[in-house]
C-alpha cells in the first residue's frame, strides 16, 4: 500500500518528536528510517537491556514496536496534530538474540481520527534478520494539539 | 480469586528471576510485592524515562505491565518450570504523570500450560494512584526448563 | 467504579439499539441487564451455535463479549452520539459448555472520545457460572451521529 | 513465507473439521480455500447477520477472522493433533457493507506448540474487495487430541 502524506515535511516533524523522547536515548534506540506510513527503529545490543537469560527484554521489544508504529502513523497526520497510542497487542514469537533489534512498522489504514498499524520486530544476528515478534496497534490523531505541548492520553 | 501456589518457595524463585533481568535495573524497577497469582512492580520517575511531553514513556508502561503479569503467572508454576510471555495487549488510558508508576497484576486463570493475567498500571502523583493503563496477557509454562538456562520463545 | 450517565434515558436508548441488531435475534441473544457503564448479554444453548466438539463456538463468545462491552460503553455516552467498536482482544480460557453463555461487561475508563471496557464471559452449567473467556476492548464515541443512521467504521 | 505441511492430507482434515462446526452452517460460511498455513472463509450477505445499521455485524467479522486463522494454523499441524484458539485481537477499520465478507488468514510463525496467525477481513461490494478489519491471533497445538473428541480450552 502506498500513502500520500498530508504534510510534505513529515520526516522532520517525526524525527524532531523522536529526538525529544528521553527514553529512546536511555535504551540507545535510533530512528533508522521514516517514510509515508512507515518507520524503522533499531536498538543495538547492550548487556543492560536484557531479561534473565541474556536475551533482549520483552519490554524493549514492545517499546520499539509501539514507537515505530506510532511514528509510522504520525508520518501521515497533518502538521498541527499530534499522535497518541490508544492500544497495541504484541506477540513474542522467537528468542530475541543478536547484535540488534529492528522494528519495522507499516500502516494498515489511516483514518481521520484512528490509524491502525502493524509492526514486525526482528533480531539481527551476524547481519541476518529473524522475525521475533509482531504487533498490531491503534493510534489516535489529536487535532490542533502540538506535539510540543503536554499531550493527554485522556482522549 | 485465591490461588494455591504449586511451589511454597515461589517468592524466592520469582525474586531471584526478577533480580537477573538487567533491564529492570536500567529502568530502576522494583518488585514491590509477590503473592500467589499476583505481583506489583514500581518504577520511580526519572527524566530519562520519558516520551516527548515529559510523561512516562508508553514503552515503560508496557514493560512493567508485562513484567508484573509474567511474574504473577510464574508465582503459580511448579519449581522446575519457567515462564514465557506469549503475548499481551495494553490500553493506555490517561497521562502517565507523577512521581512513580505502579503495575498491579492478578492472574485470571492458571492452566497447566497457559496462564491468563490482567495488569493495571497506575501513575502515582502526590501519593495518589490514578489508573493510566490496563493490560491482558497470555503466559506459557515451559516444563522442566530452568529459569537459569537460555529460555526459548520458540515454544 | 461507579459512573454517572450523561443521558438519564440511557437504558431505553441501549435497548433500542440492541433490538435493531438482526444478528442478535439470529443467535438468540438477550440483553439481560444494562446499567451505567455495564451490560449483560445472554445466549441460551442451541445445537446450531457450536464448534466441532459441541461446545459454544468461539465466534459466539467473541460476539457477545464485543456486544456487551459496546453497550456498556454506549450507556455512558450523551444521547445524540453513537458507538463504534475500534478493536477488542479476547482470551478463551476454558471449554464453553452448558445451557447458556453470559457476557458481563464493565467500563474501565470512559473518555470523551475513547472508552475502554472489560468483558468476562461465563458458561452456565446447571445454573453455575464458570469463567470461560475474558476480553478487553476499545470503543469510540461518534459525536452527533444518530445510532439510526448508517454508521461508519471509518472513524 | 512458504510452509511445508506436516500432514499431506491437511486439506481433507481441515475441511472435515470445518464441516462439523454447526455455527458455520448457521451463518452461511464457506471454507473457500485452504493451503499450507493459509485459509479463506466467505460469508454471503443476509439480512439476519447485521448490526443496527444494516452492516455486517462485528461479531460475524470476528467469527470468520478467528475461524480462518484457526484453520490456517491447523493446516500445518501433524494429523493426530487438534487446534485451540488461545486468543485473538481484532481491529475494525471500515464499514462492512456489501454482498459478502471474506477473511484471508496467513500464518506468521508456526511453532511446535504455539502458532501466530494474521487474518484480514474484506467486504466485497460489486465484486471489489475492501479491507474492513485485521486480526492477530494465537493458536495452540493440542498433541494427541483428536479433533473428533471433546476438546478442552483448559490447555
Image (cartoon, coloured by chain):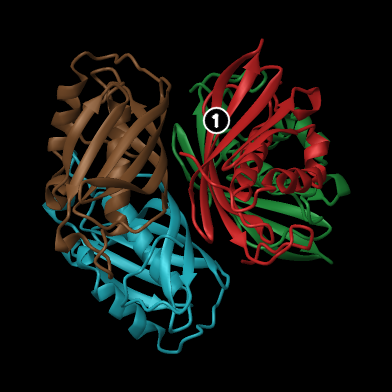
Chain colours: A brown, B cyan, C green, D red
Visible residue check, residue A46: yes
**In the image, residue B5 above or below residue D9:** below
Nearest the camera: A32 or D31?
Answer: D31
| Label 1 Cα crowd, 10 Å radius (few <14 / some 14-19 / many 20+) | many
> The residue marked by circle 1 belongs to what chain?
D
Q: Compared to C102, does D102 lie above or below?
A: above
Tell which of A52 and D52 is nearer to you.
Answer: A52
Residue shown at the point (58%, 58%) measured from the top left: D140
Q: Residue furthest top?
A: D126
**Horizontal and vertical percent position of residue C61:** 69, 48
Q: Quadrant of residue A96?
A: bottom left
Figure label count = 1
Compare residues B48 and D80 and report the one nearer the observer.
D80
Q: Position of residue D73 (x, y in %)?
A: 59, 48
In terms of secondary structure, where does tag 1 sit?
Answer: strand
Residue closest to the far front: D8
Q: Residue furthest bottom?
A: B8
* Relative to B139, residue D28 above or below: above
Frontmost residue, C19 versus C13: C19
Q: Residue at x 58, y 45 (%)?
A: C37
Kindly identify which residue carries mark 1. Answer: D133
- Residue at x 76%, y 52% (from the top left corner): C56
Amino acid at each position: 500500500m502506498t500513502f500520500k502524506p498530508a504534510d510534505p515535511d513529515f520526516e522532520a516533524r517525526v524525527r524532531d518528536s523522536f529526538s525529544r523522547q528521553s527514553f529512546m536515548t536511555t535504551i540507545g534506540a535510533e530512528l533508522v528510517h521514516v517514510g509515508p506510513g512507515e518507520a524503522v527503529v533499531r536498538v543495538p545490543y547492550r548487556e543492560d537491556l536484557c531479561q534473565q537469560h541474556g536475551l533482549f527484554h520483552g519490554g524493549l521489544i514492545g517499546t520499539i514496536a509501539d514507537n515505530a508504529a506510532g511514528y509510522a502513523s504520525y508520518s501521515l497526520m497533518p502538521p498541527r496534530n499530534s499522535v497518541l497510542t490508544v492500544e497495541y497487542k504484541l506477540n513474542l514469537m522467537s528468542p530475541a538474540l543478536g547484535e540488534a533489534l529492528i522494528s519495522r512498522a507499516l500502516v494498515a489504514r489511516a483514518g481521520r481520527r484512528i490509524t491502525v498499524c502493524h509492526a514486525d520486530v526482528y533480531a539481527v544476528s551476524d547481519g541476518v534478520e529473524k522475525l521475533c515478534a509482531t504487533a498490531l496497534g491503534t493510534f489516535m490523531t489529536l487535532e490542533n494539539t502540538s506535539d510540543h505541548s503536554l499531550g493527554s492520553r485522556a482522549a
